[in-house]
Image: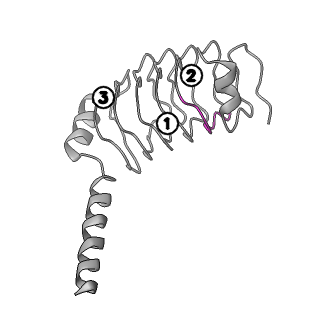
Amino acid sequence: MKKVALTAYLLIISAITFAQTISNPTHVEQFEKTGVCISCDLSNLFSLNLESDGAIDLSNSNLIRTTFGLAGSNRQHSKFNNLKGFQLSMYFGDFSYSNFSNADLREAYLADNNLTSADFTGANLEGVNFTSANLYQAKITREQLNSVSSLCNAILPDGKEGEC
């Protein structure tokens, strides 16, 4: 009897855990069609793509462990404020003038992006990889920069190059 109860308990816990780790398919479809998905669950996606260029709005959304396929795309003036982006991967995109205020970007991979004049006010950037990113004139504090994992070859807000 104890084995049956233990097995049932483990199955329930596994189902709850799994249910919390997949994105909402309706939200994915909405974002891929419109580029706008406020307060959406787009977590744990290996490749999230858009068919067109232009600003996107993912304010208050969950992008935990999601990878964007945005190579060469123009996403200037995008909104990522209050985003949950733990271990988010976005690279080779132009996110200049974008709003990342109050976003949780811990351990995110943001290398090779243009983040000129982006706003990181209040964002958690602990462990972020900004290798070769352009952060020129970004609103980002020295404390935030000290918490990232890499600024190797990055252009810093003051125009200097990050050390490797």
Tell me where residue 25 appears, x and y as whole percent.
Answer: 22, 47
Mark 2 is surrounded, within 10 Å at the Cα level, by few (under 14), some (14 to 19) or many (20 or more) other residues, namely many
Upstream in sequence: badge 3 or badge 1: 3
Q: Residue at x 29, y 47 (%)?
A: 23
Asked if the residue at tag 3 contacts the one at tag 2, i.e. Cβ–Cβ closer than 8 Å, the answer is no
Tell me where residue 133 appears, x and y as whole percent.
Answer: 64, 29
11 over 21 or under it: above or below: below
Q: Secondary structure at mark 2?
A: loop
Indicate the quadrant containing the C terminus: top left, top right, bottom left or bottom right.
top right
Choose top left, top right, bottom left or bottom right for residue 61: top left
Find the distance from the CA under tag 1 to the CA under tag 2.
14 Å
Q: Main secondary structure of the magenta part?
A: loop
Question: Start and end of the magenta stretch?
Answer: 124-131
Q: Secondary structure at mark 3?
A: loop
Instruction: List the residue tagged with mark 1.
Output: 71
Find the distance from the CA under tag 3 to the CA under tag 1.
15 Å
Is 125 in the magenta? Answer: yes
Q: Is residue 12 left or right of residue 94?
A: left
Indicate the quadrant containing the N terminus: top left, top right, bottom left or bottom right.
bottom left
| Disc number for residue 35 | 3
Instruction: List the residue tagged with mark 2.
Output: 115
Residue kind at label 3, given as amino acid type = Gly
Upstream in sequence: badge 2 or badge 3: 3
Residue kind at label 1, given as amino acid type = Ala
Q: Residue at x 26, y 84 (%)?
A: 2
